[in-house]
Amino acid sequence: MRLLFIGYVIPNEFCNMYKGCSIAGNKMQLGILKGLKKYFGNNIDIITIPAMAPFPQFKKIFVIPAKVPLIENMEAQFVPFINIPFFKQITQIIFSIFYACLWAIKNGNEKEKVIFCFNSYPNVAIAAIVLKKFFGCKIICLFADPPIDVISRKGIAKLAWNLFEKTAERSIKQFDGIVVLNRLAALDYAPEIPYIVVDGGFDPDDYAVDIVNDEVLHKRKDKIIMFSGMLIEYNGIMTLIEAFKLINDSSCKLWIFGDGPLRDYVINESKKDSRIMYKGMVSNKEIIMYQRLADILVNPRLTGNNVSKYTFPSKLIEYMLSGTPVITTKISGITEDYYPYLFFFDKETPEEFAKKITEVLNIDLYKRRKKGLATKEFIIRNKSWDFQCKRIVEFILGIILYKRGGYK
């Protein structure tokens, strides 16, 4: 069996260079590829569309084809395209089909050929569907990001998005199986297709350093509450800041990391209250270090929107690996096995956020850290990409056997 991955993965060091790249999405793709390689060895190939914002946001018009190393002994074929709106999408579709067909022809003697797509967006999904139709490939989709628009659009941009959304929704129904982060995504978008829930994962190599010694925290007078992620309304950053203002304690500090539409709002609020510290974008290694230094990590994502309904925040697993206590809203993707290891906000109001944060801060440091360590152990046991990719491979094999009529 030979597997072709079609996605948007780039080397980690490129993420800060390419405006428009999702660091969380790129980490997920790299983690999955690293895990899959342990099962497929050299029988895995990669076609990737570099994730970058269109010109003039990113100062590059022509993206040329290239072979780029991703991780040890693994390289990806960069798809060429014209980085101008409309031309960008069309050229990406054309060249992803071209390289995918070349791959299928080259591996024509392989008995089983599997295409594994990252999301069902047209620029990757159409190539997979073409290979299914003309070369008999089995196609699997990692449906991490359902087509949900989080930006207000008008005119041609809105029409283009509507076409994009409808194409992505139709495409997902063509796959032989889907991997979802949240079971509701499978039930609502493709209820008749076999699915498996893989809510996230981590690469053990990213977490080789021990957590911060409790002695350091005992000596520190400040109480650190930390948020990292996209600064956008559905992530609850505005509610969190309003809640923090209600905490009348000069020793409390709110660290905020990330970028997004609410960046200016966060900066303005930090100017009004010196306890609010906007730290911008930093490397993932630095984020991991800061998470270990914090007293509490907060995931204030609001539940009343489709992003929360159909996805799972990758930062939650990252938070839980730090050994620092985590407070979160009860989004639908958090299954019951997570419940003993998390603190939950009872309501999504500034008052309730402030109440819960204060309540957790008042728990004895030893007890807080004990729960944090238990949380870390839970993630290590159940959420490494090696563990999750074993499940994905078993799922793929099940799809192949089922199509042969030998799996029930």
Image (cartoon, grey):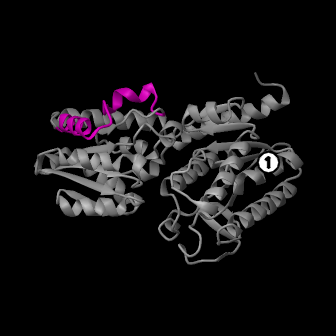
**Boundaries of the magenta span:** 333-361
Q: Amino acid at mark 1?
A: Ile
Q: Residue at x 82, y 25 (%)?
A: 406
Left or right of 140, for residue 135: right
Rendered view: 128 above or below 180: below
Q: Farthest front residue?
A: 155
> What is the quadrant of the C terminus in the image?
top right
Is residue 303 something that shows in the picture?
yes
Q: Which residue matches tag 1?
A: 129
Q: Could you tell me residue 346's position as x and y percent?
A: 30, 30
Left or right of 363, for residue 84: right
Q: Residue at x 78, y 63 (%)?
A: 94
Other-residue count near label 1 (Cα within 10 Å), few / some / many at <14 / 14–19 / ≥20: many
Q: Does 304 lie within the magenta span?
A: no
Q: Does 342 lie within the magenta span?
A: yes
Q: Residue at x 41, y 58 (%)?
A: 284
